[in-house]
Image (cartoon, grey):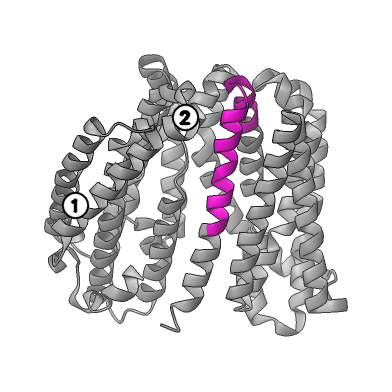
Amino acid sequence: MRRLTPTLQLVIGRSIGLAASFAIGVVLARLFEPAAFGVYKQFFLVSATLYGVLQLGMAESLYYFVPRGSRHTGRYVANAIVTLAVVGAASTAALYAARPLLAGWLTPELAANALPLGLFLTCMLAATVLEIVLIAERRHASAAITYAVSDIIRTLLFVIPALLFVSLRAVFIGAAAFAALRLAAAVAMLWRAFGRELRLDLVRWREQLGYALPFAAAVGIEVVLINYHQYVVAARFDAATFAIYAIGCMQIPLYDLIVTSTVSVLMVRMADAPGRAVALDLWHDTVCRLAFLIFPLVALLIVGAHPLIVGLFTATYSASVPIFILWTLTMLPAVMAVDGVLRVYAQTRFLLVMNLVRLGCVAGLIGALLSSFGLRGAVLVTLVALTVTKGLGLVRMAFVLRIGAGRLLPWRQLARIAAITIVSAAPAFWVQRIVGAPPLAVFMVSAAVYAATYAVLSYGSTSMFGAAPAREEQPSCAA
């Protein structure tokens, strides 16, 4: 249990923060017209993309250098903060200079808020090191509290200006104020921890940059991949239509928590595996665990898509429902957690190839699918690209582990989980038909019915999990 405590602390902290942040979109979608809400979504689409690309791997490098350089930790941290601040300031200047281009590509309203966008990005980039330092120093409780408190304050500084002024400009100024406050708090906490050691060191900066840049390229491609379809839709349609699409592509925090935590555990355990046979058992067990959680989550979201979307965002966004149903299907390929396995076996070049193939699929097909299927086509191309690249990853993994297709996946267990998932959806669908209540209440009731049915049908089905050694640790996974 002690070994799990840090993970649980971080999961709890992130969960609280994600729940608070999720509320922002719900409140603003109800407060603003779709056109204004679409501009809000574009603001954070651009900031999220640049945030991922412009980190240059410097923040992530602290996971490597902080545990190994106790005498110079403050210098590594200062190098990361200053580098990210400079990159952020340069991006702010570039955004401000590119306002005409931004107005033509996306919307004039977004271009008019280029300065708060740049300030928000700069401060968030520089402050991103805080939780990483806390985790690298094994101060997991402090990191969890920081995640939760930071996101709660973020929610307040976004929502309160919106309620007081009913103005997007006020929301964006609140966003910039939050980021500046977060950066000030981060610097204060880090100064308290490192004192005068929190200073630049060019020798160690070059060392960090040499470590970070190779990873930054892969991360940059991944960030572009994640957001490319939204840029295409934002450029081809008006802001109100983009708002419909953005709601349909809503991120589910629980999904990210499940995948990230499970794959992280797989990588650690597989790295210690004494041979390929044990590694395969661990892989089978992880795939089954992911399927056991993600299959029913996807089924529930598909069955309850209409009451969930309408209940959270009102009937104004009912057109988002078919988009959301397709978007939910993009969660399924995550069950094949091939990326983690390939990283364990140092197949990073192949991961880059996979990302390039995925980018090629999206860029090559999105125009045709948008023309044929409308907004749903942008999601379909994402689903196709994910499926193709996961298939490539499975082929490579079979080569690395020296096994055939028949042994690559736990086919029987996956089929059993899929069958239980589908059967469990019937009572939930029936409940939605007969319950007369507000949409969100209908979703909650059907979710409870689905969860109960799935639990009953799954009870005692230990054969759904893979390797025997992994099954002995099943309680810890559930925790």
**Main secondary structure along the magenta-highlighted residues:** helix
Which of the two residues, 252 or 158, is positioned nearer the viewer here?
Answer: 158
Q: Which residue is mark 2?
A: 363
Which of the two residues, 141 or 260, is positioned nearer the viewer here?
Answer: 141
Taking 32 as reference, is 95 above or below it? below
Classify the position of the C terminus by image quarter.
bottom left
Q: Which residue is mark 1?
A: 453
In which image quadrant can residue 240 be found? Answer: top right
Q: Position of residue 297 (x, y in %)?
A: 31, 48
Q: Is 32 inside the magenta-drawn segment?
A: yes
Residues rendered magenta in the picture: 16-41
Residue type marked 2: Ala
Q: Considering the numbered disc 1 on the image, is that residue within a helix, a strand or a loop?
A: helix
Find the residue positioned furthest to the front. 436
Residue type marked 1: Thr
Q: Position of residue 148 (x, y in %)?
A: 61, 60
Q: Nearer the viewer, mark 1 or mark 2?
A: 1
Dot 2: few (<14), some (14–19), or many (≥20) neighbours within 10 Å?
Answer: some
Residue at 72% across, 19% down:
108
Residue at 30% across, 44% down:
445
Judge whether residue 178 can be spotted in this image. Answer: yes
Q: Position of residue 153 (x, y in %)?
A: 69, 53
Residue at 38% across, 61% down:
342
